[in-house]
Image (cartoon, grey):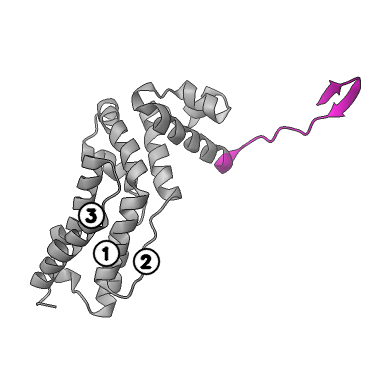
Amino acid sequence: MLVCVAGQQLQQPPRHRRRGEELEAALLEAAWDELADVGFGKLTMESVAARAKTGVAVLYRRWPRKDDLVMAAIADYGRRYPVDVRDTGSLRGDMLALLSDIGEARTVFTTVVSAAFSGLLANTGLSPAEVRERLISDRPIWSTQVYKRAQERGEIDPGSIPDAVLAMPFDLMRHDLLMTLKPIPPERIRSIVDELFLPLIALYNGGR
């Protein structure tokens, strides 16, 4: 393309046209940013398209409904910003590290998603459990890695521990994040692990 500047013709570099995975990533990022800025109720396919600097038809070809786009954007954000599952050498250390990382990294995520949740439920007709399943179905479960390492160290026998006990620290963290929409204090994390989780593990784990 030629542009005339001060009587001279200058050659503009050709505009890069996004396609395939690059385009889809840009659309999902724009949808997440729009969701975080204006919320589910004010988000429209047109506003996302404008933020992504593309035509709205591009969105509709991939996601026929607004709620499809929003759920895809939430799931994409979760994949792009995973929580690191550190190996500290012990079950207690791993749980403290993981819950601390979740509490820090997931505050914004939880705030945005919780604000969008009622709109998603109303638009999709799905139950809260069904929406959650769609959002996390293709992501690794962090606790699985922690418990697998603990089993390999001989710290626990997961088969003897009820699923409710293994899920309890994460259920409490999720509750606290939803109720406060703030990072979980370190003392609360230590209380969950040392006063609730580990005593129950010892109870079902033969006293170990």
In this picture, which residue range is highlighted in magenta? 1-22
> Mark 2 or mark 3, which is nearer the start of the sequence?
2
Q: Amino acid at mark 2?
A: Arg
**Residue 42 vertical position relative to residue 163 in the rendered view, above or below:** above
Q: Does the residue at mark 2 contact the one at mark 1 (Cβ under 8 Å)? A: no
Tell me the SS state at disc 3: helix
**Residue 8 vertical position relative to residue 164 in the rendered view, above or below:** above
Which residue is label 1 attached to?
95
Q: Which mark is residue 86?
A: 2
**Residue 205 vertical position relative to residue 134 in the rendered view, above or below:** below
Tell me the SS state at disc 2: loop
Tell me the SS state at disc 1: helix
Q: Does the segment drawn in magenta span residue 25?
A: no
* Rendered-image quadrant of the N terminus: top right
**Can residue 34 be seen here?**
yes
In percent of width and height, residue 106 lies at: 34, 48
Q: Amino acid at mark 1?
A: Met
The residue at 26%/57% (across/down) is 186
> Mark 1 or mark 2, which is nearer the start of the sequence?
2
Indicate left or right for 177 with 27 as reference. left
The residue at 45%/34% (across/down) is 33
Which residue is label 3 attached to?
170
Query: How far apart are the two marked residues, 3 and 2, measured between alpha carbons?
Result: 16 Å
Q: Amino acid at mark 3?
A: Phe
- Few, some or many residues within 10 Å of mark 2 (<14, 14–19, 20+): some
In percent of width and height, residue 174 lies at: 23, 48
> Mark 1 or mark 3, which is nearer the start of the sequence?
1
